[in-house]
Amino acid sequence: MDRRDRTVAGGLALALAVIVFAIGAPALVPSSGAEGQTSPSPSAVVSSVYREGMVGRPTSINPLTARTEADRALVGLVFAGLLRLAPGDNLRPDLAEWWRPEDGGAAWVVRIADAAVWHDGEPVTAADVEFTVAALADPALNAPQGPSWANVAVEVVDDRTVRFVLPEPLGGFPWLLTQPLAPAHLLGTVPLETMADDPFGEAPVGSGPFRMLGWDASAATLEAVRPDDPPAAADRSTSEPTTGLPSRAVPWLRGLDVVFYEDQESLVTDLERAALDGIVGAPDSATAAAGARLLSYPGTTLSTIVLDLRPDHKELRDARVRTALMAAVDRDAVIASVVDGQAGRADAPIPPSSSLFDPVASPTVAHDQKAAAKLLLEAGWKRLESKAWAAPDTTKPFSLTILVPPGAVAPHLLGTATAVATDWTTFGIKTVVEEVPFGELVDRLHAGEFTVAVVDVAIGHDPDLYPLLASSQVVSDGLNVSGIQDPKLDKLLVTARRAMGDEARKAAYSELQTYLAARRYLLTLYFRDLPFVVSDRLDGPSVHQVAQAGDRYWDVLTWRLASSR
């Protein structure tokens, strides 16, 4: 595959069992991000130490090698990117002071704030940006984010200014700048092949709002990073305290402990006995704990049915047939039974939580097997006496096999595939499910050795669908495993990813969604939520679209506990 075609900071990837870092829709106006905000004084900080529980443990707290959910969550607290999430589909500076597009979005310039420093006191510089991008793009690191940076050139303008140069304009590029930076002065000489095992991951030095004091198999202990001489006065009515220095902010919380558990039962028990202030990924039953509430963060990873649409699978190349298959599936029942209702129905490959999603351009395909039968008849299919369906020019019952990762790796995908198979079999298309080892499944998808598969696709905050659907991506390591070849779609994909500004992007994405809705190249199912159960003692967390585990801390600077422990 041509490296230019692979993705220009696309960030989208087949996730299957691993949700990877992704990017999303941009705010294109440079900003300092510190207007009207003040810093808490020591006497104004009423919060104590917030304690959060999660199932699983970290392995390497390093923004270049984070793999587990615990890794990514802790990286989100200890490390910072040039930009960070803001309310809605917006971004604000974090380590940056400002950013701006050049050359119609084919280049982006970022100025690093003078106040940006590592926890060891060293300044954050352009060298750190250059090192981070080079490391992520290097195949030796094998980072999930690697394809997103493969075609991005970093020009060091001066010690505090960098210029990113892209092969073509990309309106969503700023979302890639939320990638946490790694310190070049500490990691620059570490071989990428051994980066994951380097001692740095055990004692990470970041530039985020919390400093790592230590961690082991049971818990991680962090403390808030504060200026040496905070202002004497504070306005606690502000939503987010800052140091008053450009783009740098400090938390209200004094500290934060993350406790690791083997199972959800113990997690919920400790919440009920007030040993924890919040738990991640817990079932709805956890809200039965006195004073607990559930926050469902909408995710950006799409669980979907992919079809082989190459010429030798002509039975599925008619859009009416694909729509019939979708109408035959009760997606709401799948969501309720497989993921306990903790998901949003996907009516397009774009998350409904995104401002670029257009519900008018992406109408719902209702569960209606009578309507599905009518579509198959219109497409020339026949209903046999056995109630099975025969494709045009055949007399044998049509059947399907759904490929899926093993249930031990991705139980929600196996459960989803099983539910879909039941609906299709009831409809008259006998369907069985085949669990396939992860590596073999990936190989078979890329080789076109399948008819149907149920997989996860990490769409991310910026729903750039080019890597997933463009004709050029039907290659060995591309994401267009369906083999879609549609020149008009290619033009719409390019127009959408190049559009600059909110209105232009929304218009381009609406046109794209209208086109996709008429063709149903993907049978989209749902976007899973990230459930977060918190005690009423905790004030501040608010729901936001999340692409990876650390995103739930997007507003951690505002979190406060009602009383000291």
Image: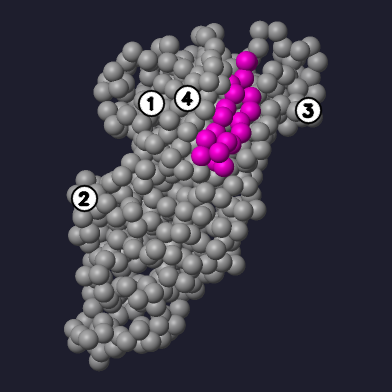
Locate residue 317, reporting x and y percent.
32, 73
Q: Which amino acid does label 4 sit on?
A: Glu
Q: Mark 3 and mark 2: span between their CA atoms?
A: 53 Å
- Which residue is at 46% across, 65% downward? 516
Does residue 496 sit above or below 363 in this rendering?
above
Foreground mark, 3 or 1, reads 1
Q: Is residue 46 magenta?
A: no
Q: In which quarter of the image is residue 262?
A: top left
Q: Name the residue under label 3.
A: 36
Q: Tag 1: Cα neighbours inside 10 Å, few (<14), some, or many (≥20)?
A: some
Crowd band around label 4 with a 10 angstrom C-alpha radius: few (<14), some (14–19), many (20+) = some
Residue 556 or 390: which is nearer the viewer? Answer: 390
Identified by mark 2, the residue type is: Asp
Which amino acid, by three-letter code, is at mark 1? Ala
User: Mark 3 belongs to which amino acid?
Assistant: Gly
Asked if residue 245 shows in the view, the reply is yes
Q: Residue beneath label 1, please?
A: 134
Give the overall secondary structure of the magenta segment. Answer: strand
Location of mark 4 (residue) = 155
Question: Residues at badges 4 and 1 in contact (C-beta under 8 Å)?
Answer: no
The Cα atoms of the two marked residues, 3 and 1, are separated by 36 Å
Q: How far apart are labels 4 and 1 at the CA level?
A: 12 Å
Q: Which residue is drawn at 19% across and 87% down?
A: 395
Q: Is mark 2 on a helix, strand or loop?
A: helix
Left or right of 263 on screen, residue 508: right
Q: Is residue 258 left or right of residue 62?
A: right
Kindly identify the residue that appears in the image at 63 percent across and 15 percent down. Answer: 115
Dot in front, 3 or 4: 4
- Label of residue 443 in the image: 2
Q: In this view, does 516 lie above or below 4?
A: below
